[in-house]
Structures are given as C-alpha cells and as structure tokens.
Image (cartoon, rainbow, N blue to C red):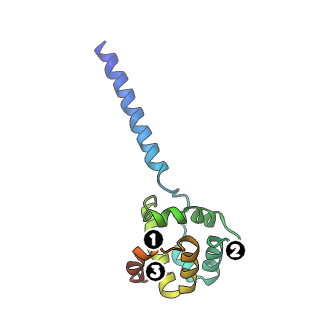
Amino acid sequence: MCFGINKRMKGATVFIFMAAVALASAQQYTDRFDGVNVDEVIMNPRLLDAYIKCALEIGKCTAEGRELKSHIQDALENNCAHCTKIQRGWVHKVIGHLINNKPEYWQRLVDKYDPKRTYTVKYEKDLKTIKA
C-alpha cells in the first residue's frame, strides 16, 4: 500500500513538472526563427526596409516579419521578458542600429508602437549607446 502511494505521488510530481515546463515555454516567444541572420538583415537596406514596412503595416510580411510584428508591443512594454536569449540580443542590435544609423525608421516605429513615449523614453538613453 505504501508503494502505491509513492507511485501515485511520483506520477503527480512528473505531471506537475511537465505542466510547469509547458507553462514556462508558453510564456516565451517561439524560437522557430532564432536562426535568422540579423546582421545580414540590418546590413542589407532592401531586407531592412521590408521588415520595417512590415512592422509599420505598410508592406508585405514574411512569416518571420509577421512573428516579429505580433510581439513588438508586448516586448516593448515588458522589456522583452518573453524573448529568448537570442531575441534579446537581436533587439539590442537592431534598436542600436536603427537609433544610430536609421533614425527615421526608429522614429516611425516609436510613433506607431509607443506614441506617448511611455516605454521608449525609459530605455532610449541606454539604447543610444548600443552600436550595431
């Protein structure tokens, strides 16, 4: 009888652990596109322009662009809390590049996703120091 309880407890523990893992991974953005070469995108004006137009909803979106666009607001408001480690690196690199090299793009994105400058004002000083 004692053995049966241990077996049920082990089963319950495994179930709880699996549920916790599923919940934790559900809170993180998909890593499906983590293999995208961000350096290639930011150094290629045609690619960068396409992603910016997608984010601004004035151009067509690739699957990667749609995924990115769907998380911009949440990532901005929550300091990329649901980003993977790779995505956090991308964010800093891309924002640094836009601020330092493409300020017109940066301003249009801020106007769209943070028109009251609630979030970007908190981070912009640090973001301006990032060199892409």
- Which amino acid type corresponds to the residue marked 1 in the rendered image? Tyr
Residue at 34 percent across and 16 percent down: it is 4
Mark 3: which amino acid?
Answer: Gly
The spot of residue 13 in percent (x, y) is 36, 31
Q: Residue at x 55, y 70 (%)?
A: 113
**Which badge, 2 or 3, comes first in the chain's sequence?**
2
Badge 2, how many Cα within 10 Å: few under 14, some, many 20+? few
Question: What's the distance in space between the residues labelled 2 and 1, CA to CA?
Answer: 23 Å
For residue 119, the mark is 1
Q: Residue at x 43, y 76 (%)?
A: 121
Which residue is outermost to the top? Answer: 1
* The quarter of the displayed image where residue 66 is located: bottom right
Q: Foreground mark, 2 or 3?
A: 2
**Which residue is the site of mark 2?**
58
- The alpha-carbon separation of the residues under discs 1 and 3 comes to 16 Å
Mark 2–mark 3 Cα distance, whole angstroms, equals: 23 Å
Q: Is residue 85 above or below residue 48?
A: above
Q: Is residue 1 left or right of residue 56?
A: left
Which quadrant is the N terminus positioned in?
top left
Numbered disc 1: secondary structure? loop
Residue contact between numbered discs 2 and 1, judged by CB atoms under 8 Å: no
The residue wearing badge 3 is: 96
State the mark number for residue 84. Answer: none
The crowd level at tag 1 (other Cα within 10 Å; few <14, some 14-19, many 20+) is some
For label 3, the crowd category at 10 Å Cα-Cα, with few meaning under 14, some 14 to 19 and many 20 or more, is: many
The vertical placement of 18 against 110, above or below, is: above
Seen from this angle, which residue lies furthest front? Answer: 116
Q: Are marks 1 and 3 in contact (CB under 8 Å)?
A: no
The image shows residue 35 at horizontal and vertical percentages of 53, 65
The disc, 2 or 1, on the residue closer to the chain's N-terminal end is 2
Mark 1 and mark 3 lie on one chain; the one further toward the N terminus is 3
Q: Position of residue 82 (x, y in %)?
A: 45, 58
